[in-house]
């Protein structure tokens, strides 16, 4: 078997242990409660609620499942419409399509790559049942405008905040604007347990039913609080509870959130400062963060001049044993998107940036010498 001539030395992402992850895993095992809603799950809930100010936080097995729960809570039905950014992961839209909704794809802004709020009102119809802003790269969408428009049309807003935990928009935490928000704790996120997520509920009217849906449609949570003497099947639902072992791993990371965020900020700013002149010289663009947004430092991306330069750039780094990756493809041009009527030209900004965007290695344990190696490789690319 022929060996790979350029094995990856610097990956795009790497698991990082930052605190008590192993200790908490062992503690969960020794406690005898490794299924859902154990002590570590409860501690995660309390930490998220107290730090963010959400009425209720519920850990889930993934951000996808948190989105599924939001679609159930909004009682999405066939014939409903949901407005979703064209530049996002399929989970954002799948949760609602599974309930029979028709996605209405909205283009993104060319600066932040977030939902373009200037296009929003023109896409709302009497069938619109939800608006799904995605805080791309952990930079807040224009939530003032989005909420004002949504409020006038009485349309719920559900934030997909997979990238943005502990980021802020005008001093307020992302994930606390909509009636609900979803979080991701996938291995590529700032805080991870491998696979995991959370539903943040900001409108109290959804809390009780969310607990029921999360517990397979039973009122089991009320039973454990002593509110009923037995629990039974009372609604639709599924099993969305992660293992308490995963919650323990996650808790250890959340407890070190200031340490993690400080390190990620340093890595992000090092990239920006080192690559600013080079990017301008070859016609590339660095991330844009409005002054009123406190980003979560989730990723560092470049917008190359065109698709050809993006592909050559990825290959250039790969030859130097560094893995860089592109990101989302336009949803409206996917096989499923075209089934919903998507055609070329519908979302021109998304079609453009999808061809040009590339993400650099970015993770907590990225060592200084590794980042310097990435930067040197980038600077040696002449366009």
Image: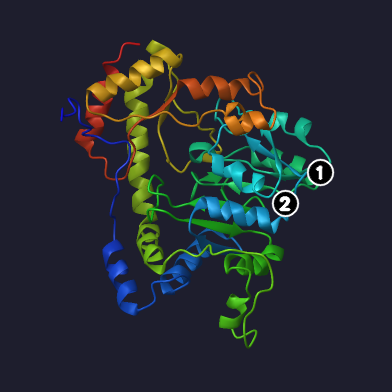
Q: Is residue 382 above or below residue 242?
A: above
User: Badge 2: few (under 14), some or many (20 or more) residues near its Cα, within 10 Å?
Assistant: many
Q: How is the image coloured?
A: rainbow
Question: Which image quarter: residue 359?
Answer: top left
Left/right of residue 168 with respect to residue 30 in the rendered view: right
Check the picture and name the quadrant holding the C terminus. Answer: top left
Check the picture and name the quadrant holding the N terminus. Answer: top left
Toward the viewer: 89 or 23? 89
Left/right of residue 286 with respect to residue 340 in the rendered view: left
Toward the viewer: 172 or 25? 25
Q: How many marks?
A: 2
Marks 2 and 1 close (CB-CB < 8 Å)? no
Horizontal and vertical percent position of residue 284: 43, 17
Horizontal and vertical percent position of residue 125: 81, 37
Q: Which residue is mark 1?
A: 153
Q: What numbered label is drawn on residue 76?
A: 2
Question: Which image quarter: residue 314?
Answer: top left
Which secondary structure lies at badge 1?
helix
Q: Is residue 48 above or below residue 345?
A: below
Q: Residue furthest bottom?
A: 229
Q: What numbered label is drawn on residue 290?
A: none
Toward the viewer: 54 or 13? 13
Residue at the spot 51% in from the left edge and 24% down from the top edge: 354
User: Badge 1: few (under 14), some or many (20 or more) residues near its Cα, within 10 Å?
Assistant: some
Horizontal and vertical percent position of residue 187: 38, 48
Alpha carbons under labels 2 and 1: distance apart = 17 Å
Residue at the spot 65% in from the left edge and 43% down from the top edge: 132
């Amino acid at each position: 078997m022929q060996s790979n001539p350029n094995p990856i030395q610097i990956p795009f992402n790497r698991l990082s242990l930052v605190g008590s992850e192993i200790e908490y895993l062992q503690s969960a095992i020794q406690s005898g409660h490794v299924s859902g809603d154990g002590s570590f799950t409860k501690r995660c809930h309390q930490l998220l609620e107290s730090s963010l100010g959400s009425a209720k936080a519920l850990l889930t097995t993934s951000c996808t499942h948190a989105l599924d729960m939001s679609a159930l809570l909004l009682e999405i039905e066939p014939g409903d419409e949901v407005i979703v950014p064209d530049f996002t992961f399929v989970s954002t839209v799948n949760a609602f399509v599974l309930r029979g909704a028709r996605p209405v794809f909205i283009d993104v802004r060319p600066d932040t790559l977030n939902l373009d709020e200037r296009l929003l009102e023109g896409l709302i119809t009497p069938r619109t049942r939800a608006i799904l802003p995605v805080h791309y790269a952990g930079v807040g969408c224009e939530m003032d405008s989005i909420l004002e428009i949504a409020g006038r049309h009485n349309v719920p807003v559900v934030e997909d905040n997979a990238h943005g935990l502990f980021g802020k928009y005008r001093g307020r935490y992302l994930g606390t604007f909509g009636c609900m928000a979803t979080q991701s704790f996938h291995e590529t996120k700032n805080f991870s347990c491998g696979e995991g997520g959370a539903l943040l509920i900001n409108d109290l009217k959804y809390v009780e039913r969310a607990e029921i849906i999360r517990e397979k449609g039973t009122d089991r949570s009320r039973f454990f609080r002593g509110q009923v003497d037995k629990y039974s099947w009372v609604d639709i639902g599924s099993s969305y509870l992660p293992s308490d072992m995963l919650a323990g791993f996650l808790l250890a990371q959340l407890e070190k959130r200031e340490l993690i965020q400080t390190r990620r900020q340093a890595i992000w700013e090092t990239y920006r400062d080192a690559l600013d002149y080079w990017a301008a010289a070859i016609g590339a663009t660095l991330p844009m963060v409005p002054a009123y947004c406190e980003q979560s430092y989730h990723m560092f991306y470049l917008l190359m001049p065109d698709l050809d330069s993006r592909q050559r750039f990825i290959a250039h780094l790969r030859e130097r044993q560094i893995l860089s990756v592109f990101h989302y493809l336009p949803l409206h041009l996917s096989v499923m998107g075209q089934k919903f009527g998507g055609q070329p030209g519908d979302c021109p900004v998304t079609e453009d940036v999808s061809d040009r965007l590339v993400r650099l290695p970015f993770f907590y344990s990225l060592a200084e010498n590794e980042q310097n190696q990435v930067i040197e490789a980038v600077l040696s690319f002449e366009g």
